[in-house]
Image: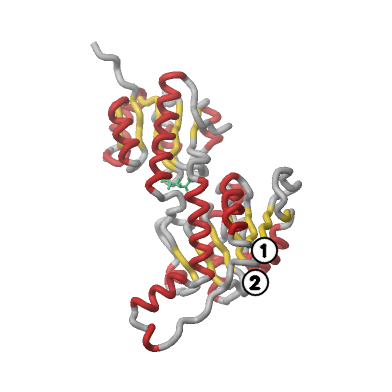
Amino acid sequence: MSEQKTDILVWGPMHASLMQNLERDYSVHKLADINDIDAWADQHGTQVRGVVTSGVFGTDNAILDRLPNLEVVNSFGVGYDAVDTQYLSRRGIKLSNTPDVLNNAVAETAMALMLCVSRRISEAERFVRAGQWPNGKFPLGNDLCGKTCGIVGLGKIGKTIAKRAAAFEMNIAYFRRGRPYDDVSYRHYGDLRELAQDSDYLIVIVPGGPDTQHLIDADVLRALGPKSFLINVARGTVVDEKALVASLLASEIAGAGLDVFDDEPNVPAELLKLDNVVLTPHIGSGTYETRQAMADLVFANVKGYFDKGTLVTPVEL
Ligand code: 8YV
């Protein structure tokens, strides 16, 4: 008789190769296919030992409550602010994420947004497509070279962005509460408003969650000023979106490049009308290579846990 496969609940649509691997080795329940969660939980809830989710889907404690034998949550993505870590910790449930493998892709997205807003690439493309070129010249943009790139959150992705921005001959500065890092020589600011004041491009790349909620508020935006740009590749929650919309409408900052929003996939209607704002649909890690590496790392964590009792990239809870 073949061994019983471990039951896993998959929270939403996942990378195809991850699904293939999971369906081969585990008994997979797909939340998206479950119509009546109570009826499903009555029948299968006690069997489920693992949950596979993503940084975007997160988890819902009311559903996790129905999985009394849950041991591990494996999340696709580096950010896990959509998972209630205190709840997991209380129940002794382990958590893994996918750090490092997406550093380059997210850093490239930050650079893309910075170039896009500085050189007005989206606006210029709309100009050509609308047949406006024969009618006149397109307005000038701004250099990156020689400008100050202020990084809010010099973690692994922040450092990867810094290297790339330095290659564009930008001056690198960063915000960190308290002491500067020992292993970098970039200019340190312990005061976010001062960094904003001195930055031409302020790049937000801190983890989401209560500690960073609305870190970029009306004051910081005012300090950034009418000649400077905000780039957000972190989480929508880190920026006070209402304050950002107000500051853009009042031309208090020069523009913004935004990959993340408060209420994804909904984007404030006011932003859609602004030519100095570049909007992308949370594509920070969205390359073939990176998503494959993330999918492989999620699977390695699932396998590692159920085969050997160890996670490859555990989150300390
Ligand atoms: C998403 C991200 O998780 O890693 C993160 O924190 O925001 C992204 O990589 C990913 O898009 C989930 O599908």
Of residues 182 and 312, which is closer to you in this image?
182
User: Which percent across, then down, holds residue 192?
Assistant: 69, 58
Of residues 91 and 38, which is closer to you in this image?
91
Q: Tell me if 148 is positioned left or right of 116 in this view.
A: right
Question: Disc 1 designates what residue?
Answer: 196
**Type of residue at label 1?**
Ala
Q: Is residue 235 visible?
A: no
Beta carbon at label 2 within 8 Å of ligand 1: no
Q: Is residue 96 above or below residue 58?
A: above
Q: Is residue 67 visible?
A: yes
Q: Quadrant of the N terminus?
A: top left
Q: Quadrant of the C terminus?
A: top right
| Farthest bottom residue in view | 135
User: Which percent across, then down, holds residue 248?
Assistant: 55, 72
**Type of residue at label 2?**
Gly
User: Which percent across, then down, holds residue 276?
Assistant: 50, 73
Question: Disc 2 designates what residue?
Answer: 225
CB under 8 Å between discs 1 and 2: yes
Of residues 216 and 180, which is closer to you in this image?
180
User: Which percent across, then down, holds residue 288?
Assistant: 37, 47
What residue is shown at x 50% (from left), y 42% (from top)? 78
What residue is shown at x 33% (from left), y 82% (from top)? 131
| Farthest left residue in view | 1
What residue is shown at x 64% (from left), y 59% (from top)? 150
How far apart marks 1 and 2 lie (CA) works out to: 8 Å
Q: Is residue 25 above or below residue 154?
A: above
What SS does tag 2 mark? loop
